[in-house]
Amino acid sequence: MAYTTIDNPGEFFNTVLYTGNNGAQTVTGVGFQPDWVWIKDRDGTERHCLTDSVRGVLKELRSNEAAAESDRSAGDSGVAGVSAFNSDGFVLVHDDGYNDNNSLQVSWNWKAGTSFTNDASSTSVGSIDSAGSVSTDARFSIISWTGTGANATVAHGLGSVPKTIILKNRDSAENWIVGHNSNGWGKYQTLNTNDATSTASNIWQDTAPSSSIFTIGASGKVNGSSHKMIAYCFAEVKGYSKFGSYVGNGNADGPFVYLGFRPAFVLWKRTQDNGYDWDIYDTARDTHNVAFKELLANGNGAESDGTVLSLDILSNGFKLRTNNNNGNASGKTYIYMAFAENPFVNSKGIPNNAR
């Protein structure tokens, strides 16, 4: 059996940098038509912007805020201007924070691409209807449904078991909910805060996802009655994506985390104790080791200057190069999600090189 089914991860995930021009702009170089675009101003204290093809253009969610979805097409002001997705990127209209003149910006882009609709009463898969966009190759889906305010199951379309689910109530100022296999499904974390892992039975009902559905409780955070809901679901693909955990050693010669690929993007979070952020690193902003350009998914701050955290990006994983508590406190557990730049070994058995 081949080591990986994805020799070119850039067909499904890519980071693109661009410079704002204070007007209409087409951002190219993604390499595919993205279905989920996540943008952050690197220079300024600006909110994150998350737009996807399922909710539609000109609709903004913010990973650093609990705020409900804003819709520029419905007249909401101050909303990010992703006005179209095209075959090699996306189109921006002017918006403060995401296209300011001469501002440095980063966009993280994922491809799903195949339309998905599930009529629960017809298929007997899940208890409520769901729809969205899915890639069974990359094992990534964007799933929407209307909340019922009660315990439910939702079809995700992946055909394999999700390891991470990022979920948001679009209509209400509810925290973002993150379910992660390393935490277990009796627990959750909040993407927009630096809070520790929480325990609650009304989020995932203490039930792990299956290859066809995920389970949600009656909480308004995950299934608000008559509210529009959205979930980003990820299963692992060897050589392309991994969702796991590591334990810090409190040493500048930090732990090595094996991924099975050279990562293009890594997001991690300390699970114990309040006060620790969601750190994002990528190889487009950091082209050489040691990597140190940090952004926070739960914060609006500008890109760090390397005084907080640093790591080496390796051919088969990453290695912490700091003893900072946000990424490498002794005996503390950190969850992560990572996507590949190149697999460690391709489908023909040829190994990748370190950078």
Image: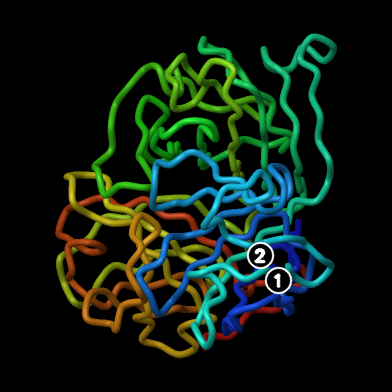
**Kind of residue at badge 1:** Gly
306 or 17, which lies in front? 17
Instruction: Please tell me whether residue 30 is drawn above or below residue 80 in the rendered image.
Output: below
Secondary element at image label 2: strand
Label 2: few (<14), some (14–19) or many (≥20) C-alpha neighbours in 10 Å: many
- Report the residue at 55% width, 35% height from top: 170
Query: What residue is disc 2 on?
Result: 13
- Report the residue at 69% width, 42% height from top: 55
Label 1: few (<14), some (14–19) or many (≥20) C-alpha neighbours in 10 Å: many
126 or 53, which lies in front? 53
Query: What residue is disc 1 on?
Result: 10
- Report the residue at 68% width, 69% height from top: 92
Image quadrant in which you'd find residue 246: bottom left
Left or right of 11 in this view: 355: left
**Tags 2 and 1 touching, CB below 8 Å:** yes
**Kind of residue at badge 2:** Phe
